[in-house]
Image (tube, rainbow, N blue to C red):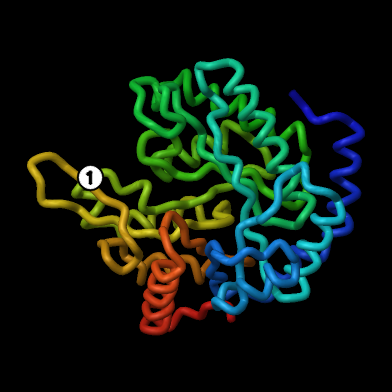
Amino acid sequence: MPISRRTFHKTMALSALAATDITIAGNSQSKIRLGGPIFENAADPEAWAKAHRALGYSAAYCPLNYHDSAEQKRAFAEAARQNDLLIAEVGAWSNPISSNKEESQAAIMKNIEALALAEEVGALCAVNIAGSRGEDWAGIHPLNTSDETFEMVVAAVRHIIDSVKPTRAFYTLETMPYTIPDSPDVYLSLIKAIDRRQFACHLDPVNLINSPRRFYNNGELIRECFKKLGPYIKSCHAKDVALQNKALVHLDEVIPGQGGLNYAVLLSELSKLPGAAVLMLEHLQTAEEYQQAANYIRQVASREGVQLYS
């Protein structure tokens, strides 16, 4: 289901207009751009950008969708550039490998549009999960780690990237607990199999922690991810994980600082990435929780001598 030639050329024209947006990452090689959602109604592009900067954020989730007007896209891209705010990612959350054909086709189109939007507004990446063979788009299924599913993911990602042919934005899959890629080695295998320059990595280290061994040694897991995937990592999600003392293994997602994720290692490894190092807060319920999480990350960064982009 590729986008039409007319739509594609429109996308490329808008990309040229936003071409300077990505350059704001060029001077942040040793600094991390922290970002997260905002809770105020900021339909005006300038107000949207300033709301992020008022919270100390230098990165943002894309506030637009593919069908917004070209004028809106230009306005938000320009507001980001003027306020030194990096549009980090465009979400494409859906299930491209769903067993329901209509659902999978709709998901493929949603991902094509998300990647095209990322290219238009100068975002670093469009991000989705690989998808699940089960009823839950991100849930368990016995075939999720099979060779057959691996090939389905490869085919879907190739189709999405080849339909848009981006030159700046990357298409990424988030590391996940129940679906591939569920380890750095599996991610490397996907990168090799997909074989597209604009395919890259979206790292969520919490999603890779699915056992006591990984929980207690997550610093080494994070180092392994950056050692193997560092050149491909375009954005990271920031959250935390707590291991509960129950008869069967039970892990809960919690506010950063209330769990066991080794943020000292994560921030140190992020700061070594060339270009834009991006860390995006997610999944919290209130503005106060996001402020608490951001403050914790800033405290760890200060303690470890890691610079955050201000």
Which residue corresponds to the image point at 17% horizontal and 42% vertical from the top-left?
249
Quarter the N terminus occupies = top right
- Percent position of residue 199, x then y: 63, 42
Q: Quadrant of residue 217?
A: bottom left
Which residue corresponds to the image point at 69% horizontal and 28% vertical from the top-left?
159
The answer to which of 296 and 187 lies nearer the viewer is 296
Q: Amino acid at mark 1?
A: Ser
Q: Quadrant of residue 143?
A: top left
Furthest-front residue in view?
A: 41
Q: Is residue 186 above or below residue 87?
A: above
In the displayed structure image, the side of residue 89 where residue 188 appears, left or right: left
In the displayed structure image, the side of residue 58 where residue 272 appears, left or right: left
- Percent position of residue 226, x then y: 45, 57
Label 1 CA crowd tier, 10 Å (few <14, some 14–19, many 20+): few
Quarter the C terminus occupies = bottom right
Q: Is residue 250 above or below residue 132?
A: below
- Percent position of residue 4, x then y: 85, 29
Q: Quadrant of residue 3?
A: top right
- Residue on which the image places disc 1: 211
Furthest-left residue in view?
A: 247
The answer to which of 58 and 270 lies nearer the viewer is 58
